[in-house]
Image: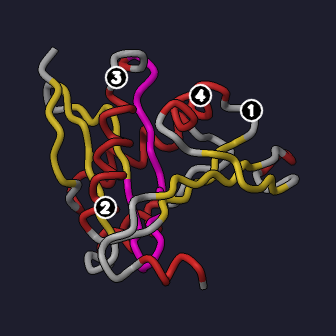
Amino acid sequence: MSVTLREMTVDDIPAVHQLETELFPEDAWPVAAFESELAQNETRNYWVYENDGQIIGYAGLCTVLPISDVQTIAINPEFQGQGLGRKLLTLLVETAKQRNALDVMLEVRFDNPTAISLYESMGFITIHRRVGYYKGGVDALIMRLQLDAPQGQEEARKV
């Protein structure tokens, strides 16, 4: 296995979308959503995992200070359980810190205990539950990770 992590490009969108529709058939983003996200490079960061030329995972982050929001994170089931998702999430959190965010937010399907467990193990806490948020009436958990406030940013959290 030779897995590499790199920034996502427009050329990756078809393969990312294919994986997206396999992993999230009810909630898959359309191709245009990925195109729009990549076009907003001032506030967005996206990466892909590649194995022998095949996209096996991807993740994206939106930062509009003081918050960074995990837009998406996914790993092909054949490659789950190897720490790749944790590495991607760590990269998202580190990027949020570099961008001086005070919090990292995400939403996750209530019926995805594997993802919830990963997020909790990295310090995310559930702050809200959106009833019936996803198609099929599945609830969403809104989770937050508070980051250390950079110098001069402490007051922004109090607002």
User: Which labelled disc corresponds to residue 97?
Assistant: 2
Query: What residue appears at the point 50 percent right and 57 percent down from the top-left corner?
Result: 146
Q: Amino acid at mark 3?
A: Gly
Q: Residues within 10 Å of mark 3 (few under 14, many from 20)?
A: few
Q: Of helix, strand and loop, which mostly describes the magenta segment?
A: strand
Q: Quadrant of the C terminus?
A: bottom right
Evaluate if marks 2 and 3 touch, with contact meaning CB atoms under 8 Å apart.
no
Badge 2 or badge 3: first in the primary sequence: 3
Using the image, determine if residue 51 lies above or below residue 38: above
Residue 57 falls in image quadrant = top left
Q: Nearer the viewer, residue 25 or 78?
A: 78
Magenta residues, as a range?
Answer: 60-78
For mark 1, what is the residue? 111
Foreground mark, 2 or 3, reads 2
Foreground mark, 4 or 2, reads 2
Question: CA gap, disc 4 to disc 2?
Answer: 22 Å
Q: Amino acid at mark 2?
A: Lys
Question: CA gap, disc 2 to disc 1?
Answer: 29 Å
SS of the residue under disc 2: helix
Badge 1 or badge 3: first in the primary sequence: 3
